[in-house]
Image (cartoon, rainbow, N blue to C red):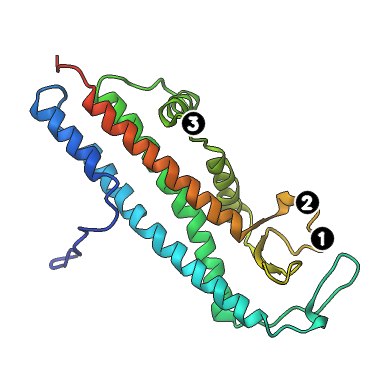
Amino acid sequence: MVNRWLHLLMLGGDPWLLPIWAAANEAAREGRVQPLTDELREFGLHVSIRLNVLPRVAQRIMQECYEVYVAAKEHRPEHVFTEVSQGYAFPLKDDLKYRLIADIDSFLFESNSCWELMRKVFRLIRAHVGRPVADGSAGLTDELKRALGGVGQQWFSWLDRHRNFVAHKGTPYLAIDVTNDDEWDLLVMKENLRTFADPGKFFRYTEMVQVAREFDTARLALQTHLIELFQRAGPRR
């Protein structure tokens, strides 16, 4: 039985929701919409927490990749694999290796979950201002596509696919693409590969960076759209 506890202060951090709620409160004061529901505020809190988690996970991955590259500079010719020759696996400290794998898993999961929560907030706000989205995921996807304008959601398909793998099917392996001495790239494999001819069996660190950028672009576009929904809301009936 919990009889005494401490709540941790959750203020500060990512401000994505603040201008949306400000527009909602203004519309409510003017009598154009009902005040925000407890459900909407609760979902908003969940989104904010995930938006605060994501940059910290991304920063850890960036630092860990840097450390991996620094350590791998000590590799010798016998450590290099090609499609015609087998090398010796490069020894990397377990703590660094498994922290990186855990953070890659976290990036995939947190990004995916955050966007799913944003989709729920979008649906709830649309209903709140009297413009409900049709039932079903297809209707939601179509409305989101229109809301985001020219901002694509291909990044989410990429994210959803790889998140589903690490959540339900397997655990990533790590390798480093040293094809270009000046531009190494971390390879996240879905199995212990002996060839990288099939791009469906692995992804790159640089792809994660691009997905993070596209996610940021999409969330800002969605923020603008949600603010405009409250600004354009008609008189409350």
Q: Position of residue 185 (x, y in %)?
A: 65, 65
Point out the image quarter for the C terminus.
Answer: top left
The part of the image, by quadrant, that contains residue 96 is: bottom right
Q: Which residue is mark 1?
A: 195
Secondary structure beneath dot 3 equals loop
Left or right, 234 with respect to 193, comes to left
The part of the image, by quadrant, that contains residue 49 is: bottom left
Q: Which residue is mark 3?
A: 150
Q: Residue at x 29, y 54 (%)?
A: 14
Numbered badge on residue 198: 2
Secondary structure beneath dot 1 equals loop
Q: Residue at x 22, y 59 (%)?
A: 10
- The earlier-in-sequence mark between 3 and 2 is 3
Q: Residues within 10 Å of mark 1 (few under 14, many from 20)?
A: few
Question: Residue flagged by tag 3: what amino acid is it?
Answer: Gly
Q: Position of residue 63 (x, y in %)?
A: 50, 72
Left or right, 40 with respect to 172, comes to left
